[in-house]
Amino acid sequence: MKKPSWKTYALWIVGVEAVGALSGFLTRDGAEVYSETIRQPPLSPPAIVFPIVWSILFLLMGVSAARIYAAPASPDRTRGLRLFAIQLAFNFFWSIIFFNLQNFGFAFLWLMVLWALILWMIFTFRKTDSLAAWLQVPYFLWVTFAAYLNLGVWMLNR
């Protein structure tokens, strides 16, 4: 694999962070209502934790995607980049479903699809670049924790 240039990394990181920022911007009012009115399960972190964690995760996701993008063309590389784009779209829309629509049950099902897509993406990335796959593991773990929180919110607020 050729080493990606700093421009490749920058493009992927900025692009992924922009998706996260847009999602945060579009759901800011819903997130505020959520934090003021919705019962949350045990282990729910303070609201300030989420933008910090997501910024770090989006950075890792961007670095990972840049590494896959820079890899030699192959069916696994193509599949990995497609999975990356699909899971990123699922990530984006989950926030809208959860915070703006407050449809916690559907958001949980949506998140389970996202969880499976991330896992599939990790295994696909591994065939092209093992470091790129490992960089996705914190994201997978955080989404696993988010699934617990989402399920808890759904159960507590029916």
Image (spheres, helix red, strand yellow):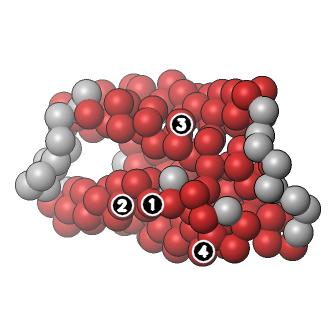
Q: Amino acid at mark 2?
A: Leu
Q: Secondary structure at mark 4?
A: helix
In primary-sequence order, the first of circles 3 and 2 is 3
Q: Earlier in the sequence, mark 4 or mark 2?
A: 4
Residue ID for mark 3: 59
* Vertical relation: 99 (above or below) 130: above
In the rendered structure, which amino acid carries the disc numbered 4?
Answer: Phe
Q: Secondary structure at mark 2?
A: helix
**Cα separation between marks 4 and 2:** 15 Å
Q: Is residue 49 left or right of residue 102?
A: left
Relative to 73, is 157 on the left or the right?
left
Q: Quadrant of residue 128?
A: bottom right
Residue for badge 4: 123
**In the image, is residue 7 above or below residue 151?**
above
**Residue 113 showing in the rendered view:** no
Question: What residue sits right under mark 1 in the picture?
Answer: 137
Q: Residues at badges 2 and 1 in contact (C-beta under 8 Å)?
A: yes
Which mark sits nearer the N-terminus, 4 or 3?
3
| Residue 115 x/y as whole percent | 48, 67
Is residue 112 visible in the rendered image? The answer is yes
Residue 2: give x, y in percent of width and height. Answer: 82, 49
What amino acid does circle 3 point to?
A: Leu
Q: Quadrant of the C terminus?
A: bottom left
Disc 2 marks which residue? 141
Mark 2 is surrounded, within 10 Å at the Cα level, by few (under 14), some (14 to 19) or many (20 or more) other residues, namely few
Label 2 – label 1 distance at C-alpha? 6 Å
Please provide percent x and percent y for residue 85. Answer: 71, 54
**Marks 3 and 2 close (CB-CB < 8 Å):** no
**Secondary structure found at label 1:** helix
